[in-house]
Amino acid sequence: MEKGKSYQNMAIRMLKSLLSAYIITGILLLFLALLLYKFQLSEPKVNIGIIIVYVISSFLGGFLEGKMMKARKFLWGAAAGLLYFAILALISLAVNQSFGGGSSHFVTTLILCTAGGTLGGMVS
C-alpha cells in the first residue's frame, strides 16, 4: 500500500514540474512572438529563440523535479527533460502530422531538452 502511494507522489511531482515547464514555455514563446512582431526578426533568429525557450523550460522542469525528489536529482531532471520533449514531440506530431525540421532537428531537440533537464536536476 505504501509503495503505491509513493509512486502516486512521484507521478504528481513529475506532473507539477512538467506543468510548470509548459507554463514557462508559453510565457517565453509569447515574449518571443512580441519580439518577432516588434523587431521583425529573421527566421534563424526565431529558431534560435525557440531552442533557447526549450532549454530554459526543460532546465526549469528538471530543477523543480530535482528539488522535489531530493535523491538522484540529475536522473529525475533527465526524466523531466525527456518527458518534456516527448510531450512536445507528440503535440508537434498531432498538429503537423510529422516532426518539423527533419530528423536532425528532432534529435538535436531531444538532446537539448534532456541535457537541460539533467542540468536543472544537477543544479537543484
Image (cartoon, helix red, strand yellow):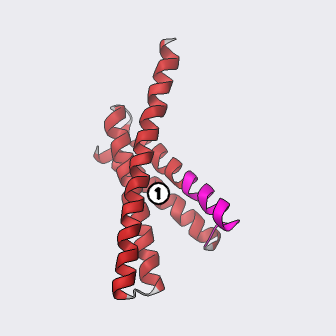
Q: Residue at x 56, y 52 (%)?
A: 87
State the image coordinates of residue 57 (x, y, percent, origin top left).
39, 57
| Between 97 and 73, the one nearer to me in the picture | 97
**Furthest-top residue in this view:** 1
Q: Quadrant of the C terminus?
A: top left
Question: Is any part of residue 55 visible from this angle?
Answer: no
In the picture, measured across the screen, residue 23 lies left or right of residue 89, that is left
Three-letter code for the amino acid on which mark 1 is drawn: Cys
Q: Quadrant of residue 122?
A: top left
Q: Residues within 10 Å of mark 1 (few under 14, many from 20)?
A: many
Segment colored magenta: 86-100
| Between 67 and 96, the one nearer to me in the picture | 96
Q: Residue at x 50, y 16 (%)?
A: 3
The number of numbered discs placed on residues in the rendered structure image is 1
Q: Quadrant of residue 115?
A: bottom left
Compared to residue 62, the image places residue 7 above or below, namely above
**Furthest-left residue in this view:** 123
- Where disc 1 sits, the SS reads helix
Q: Residue at x 40, y 43 (%)?
A: 17
State the image coordinates of residue 82 (x, y, percent, origin top left).
51, 49
State the image coordinates of residue 98 (x, y, percent, origin top left).
69, 66
Say which residue label 1 marks.
113
Q: Is 24 included in the stretch rendered in magenta? A: no
Question: Is any part of residue 122 visible from this angle?
Answer: yes
State the image coordinates of residue 99 (x, y, percent, origin top left).
65, 66
In the picture, measured across the screen, residue 113 lies left or right of residue 35, that is right
Main secondary structure of the magenta stretch: helix
